[in-house]
């Protein structure tokens, strides 16, 4: 029997509700294939920050280092600045463990209504650069509180950083439809974006079966709404990928269903799996959060661990529950988090799974 060690950080707000839902469904899916997950629960997040002044222990990253992966809920609390919660937990994990690919698959799940009148075939994967770009640490603020007050923030793009994320996206495009869209803004951002375009083009040039298209990010946002079927794999910088993937999640029906994988492709370090959504303080504690984003992220985790069969069982169980009409409030349904989770567990226990369940 295979055992994988996974660190679980439920974090804040609805993370506390959707993560336990996901771990119970992962356990059930793994039981069907003879796999075991050893969960290492970490009570890190805003509550810890209030008590100890830090989101995680000073040796927190070392504690995660020997694990096989990390399952994260969300971080963020209304009484703590977002830069404290984000930079105190999420971003150090992404950067220390060189999780330079943020993979976000999006498609319209069975029984889920897109807000688009004619969504056609909306089935795409966004490959977002996750370690550099616009989310840099270089900059500062001066003259606070005076009319001259100013802020400077540098974007950092490196050849290595662009090459490695572009290579991942090109390989993914090769496995899918052979189409790759690169989000750019080289008409307005005149140093980093032409460099991004050049390096992405060089990498794509090594894969003759992949057709690369450079699209200005504003036009791409409009195109994703008007012709979502014209997009398959998107490669984007940290900021552009962040924004486009929330747009894509909304087009797919709800931000509550969108998953994300923070991958260290060479597998030198653990990768981290989380939903795209945040801690949703407006609904936290009400038991109405949609656990699908967390479940789908967990299926991506199982695939990464080489447990494709368990991933397919999990995917088809929650897709089946949705298709049956069990839906949370954000999808127009009435099911609570717990009721939806129970429907998924029932489907896994009943073996009523459709083996086509695919995580990406
Ligand atoms: N990766 C992360 O941990 C992450 C990501 C985004 C935002 N955040 C943080 O979360 C906090 C709240 O941010 P926000 O309000 O901009 O974004 P959010 O994703 O938390 O919520 C946006 C809206 O979507 C709804 N929503 C989100 N997830 C849902 C789910 N699973 N089921 C049903 N409805 C859902 C919320 O109720 C809210 O109306 C902030 O502190 C922010 O910094 C964290």
Image (cartoon, rainbow, N blue to C red):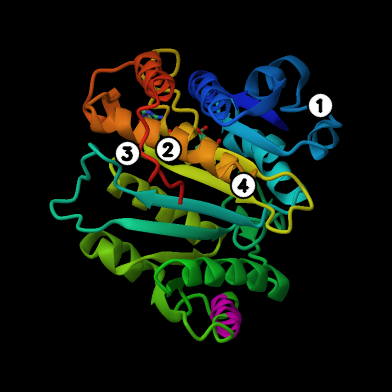
As rendered, which of 315 and 122 lies closer to the eye? 315
As rendered, which of 271 and 182 lies closer to the eye? 271
Alpha carbon separation for disc pair 3 and 4? 25 Å
Predominant secondary structure in magenta? Answer: helix
Q: Is residue 73 magenta?
A: no
* Crowd around label 2: few <14 · some 14–19 · many ≥20 (10 Å): many
* Crowd around label 1: few <14 · some 14–19 · many ≥20 (10 Å): some
Alpha carbon separation for disc pair 1 and 4? 27 Å
Whether label 3 lies within 8 Å of ligand 1 gets the answer yes
Name which residue lies at 74% across and 53% down.
267
Choose the circle earlier in sequence order: 3 or 4: 3
Name which residue lies at 49% across and 72% down.
174
Q: Which mark is residue 315?
A: 2
Q: Position of residue 23 (x, y in %)?
A: 56, 23
Q: Nearer the viewer, mark 2 or mark 1?
A: 2
Q: Is 297 positioned to the left or the right of 96 in the image?
A: left
Choose the circle earlier in sequence order: 1 or 4: 1
Magenta stretch in the rendered image: 193-203
Q: Which residue is mark 1?
A: 57
Q: Which residue is mark 3?
A: 254
Question: Element at badge 2?
Answer: helix
Q: Is 268 positioned to the left or the right of 103 in the image?
A: right
* Crowd around label 3: few <14 · some 14–19 · many ≥20 (10 Å): many
Query: Pointers 1 and 4 in contact (CB under 8 A)?
Result: no
């Amino acid at each position: 029997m295979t055992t994988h060690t996974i660190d679980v950080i439920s974090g804040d707000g609805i993370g506390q509700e959707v993560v336990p839902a996901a771990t119970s469904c992962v356990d059930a899916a793994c039981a069907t294939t003879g796999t075991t997950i050893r969960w290492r629960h970490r009570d890190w997040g805003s509550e810890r920050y209030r008590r100890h002044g830090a989101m995680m222990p000073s040796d927190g990253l070392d504690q995660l280092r020997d694990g096989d992966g990390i399952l994260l809920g969300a971080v963020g609390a209304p009484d703590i600045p977002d830069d404290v919660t984000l930079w105190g937990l999420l971003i150090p994990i992404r950067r220390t463990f060189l999780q330079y690919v943020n993979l976000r698959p999006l498609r319209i799940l069975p029984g889920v209504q897109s807000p688009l009148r004619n969504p056609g075939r909306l089935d795409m994967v966004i490959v977002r650069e996750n370690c550099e770009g616009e989310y840099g640490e270089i900059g500062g603020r001066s003259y606070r509180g005076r009319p001259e007050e100013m802020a400077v923030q540098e974007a950092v793009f490196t050849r290595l950083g662009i090459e490695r994320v572009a290579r991942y996206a090109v390989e993914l495009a090769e496995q899918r439809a052979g189409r790759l869209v690169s989000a750019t803004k080289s008409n307005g951002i005149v140093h980093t974006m032409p460099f991004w375009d050049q390096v992405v083009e060089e990498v794509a040039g090594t894969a003759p079966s992949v057709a690369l298209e450079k699209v200005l990010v504003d036009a791409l946002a409009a195109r994703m709404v008007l012709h979502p079927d014209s997009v398959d794999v998107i490669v984007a910088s940290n900021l552009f990928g962040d924004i486009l993937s929330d747009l894509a999640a909304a087009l797919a029906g709800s931000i509550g269903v969108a998953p994300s994988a923070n991958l260290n492709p060479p597998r030198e370090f653990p990768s981290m799996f989380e939903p795209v959504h945040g801690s949703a303080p407006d609904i936290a504690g009400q038991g109405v959060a949609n656990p699908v984003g967390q479940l789908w992220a967990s299926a991506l985790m199982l695939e990464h661990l080489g447990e494709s069969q368990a991933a397919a069982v999990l995917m088809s169980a929650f897709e089946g529950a949705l298709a049956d009409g069990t839906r949370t409030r954000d999808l127009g349904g009435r099911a609570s988090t717990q009721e939806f989770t129970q429907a998924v567990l029932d489907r896994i226990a009943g073996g009523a799974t459709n083996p086509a369940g695919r995580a990406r």
